[in-house]
Amino acid sequence: MKSRLKELTSRSNGWGYAKRKQKLKEYIRGWVGYYHLANMKRLLLETDEWLRRRIRMCIWKAWKKVKTRVANLIRCGINEYQAYEWGNTRKGYWRIADSPVLKRAINNDNLRSAGYATLMEAYLEWYPK
């Protein structure tokens, strides 16, 4: 499952946000629909954390230029100094995706409202409690 999710969230596949969201949603619903009989809450929660970090990494790469990163961080509610500091960083995409600044800017609620599917939500469709 993780290797397939890694393919779908590759930062070099050239897909836009909409196509990536659609492919993730299709795969997650299919996978959870097939394996929903197993008791796997812990696995899904941990995989969701990892998947959100992968999505943040893709978004960070899509912003490309320093100017765009700074502007988008400010738009997401980060103060100007921190936005400039993190927008100009040379750290890798994966490392930045786990930074507290990017976690605040692109939080779980923002990802959910943007339409990204999560494993746990798909699982809770089968077991609402």
Image (cartoon, rainbow, N blue to C red):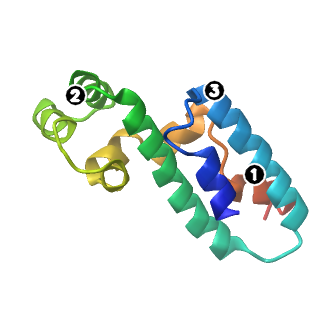
Mark 1 or mark 2, which is nearer the start of the sequence?
Answer: 1
Label 2 secondary element: helix
Label 1 secondary element: helix
Label placed on residue 28:
1
Residue 59 found in image quarter: top left
Q: Residue furthest left?
A: 81
Crowd around label 1: few <14 · some 14–19 · many ≥20 (10 Å): many
Query: Which residue sits at x=71%, y=63%?
Result: 1
Crowd around label 2: few <14 · some 14–19 · many ≥20 (10 Å): some
- Is 8 in front, or is 126? 8
- Is 88 in front, or is 116? 88
Residue 19 found in image quarter: top right
Query: Which residue sits at x=64%, y=45%?
Result: 8
Q: CA distance from mark 1 to mark 3?
A: 15 Å
The picture places residue 38, in percent across and down from the top left corner, at 84, 76
Label placed on residue 66:
2
The picture places residue 61, in percent across and down from the top left corner, at 39, 36
The kind of residue tagged 1 is: Ile
Crowd around label 3: few <14 · some 14–19 · many ≥20 (10 Å): few
- Callouts 1 and 3 close, C-beta under 8 Å: no
**62 relative position to 86: left or right:** right
Disc 2 versus disc 1: nearer the observer: 2
The kind of residue tagged 3 is: Ala
Residue 57 found in image quarter: top left
Label placed on residue 18:
3
The kind of residue tagged 2 is: Val
The picture places residue 13, in percent across and down from the top left corner, at 57, 36
Query: Which residue sits at x=74%, y=74%?
Result: 40
Vertical comparison of 42 with 11: above or below: below
Q: CA distance from mark 2 to mark 3?
A: 23 Å
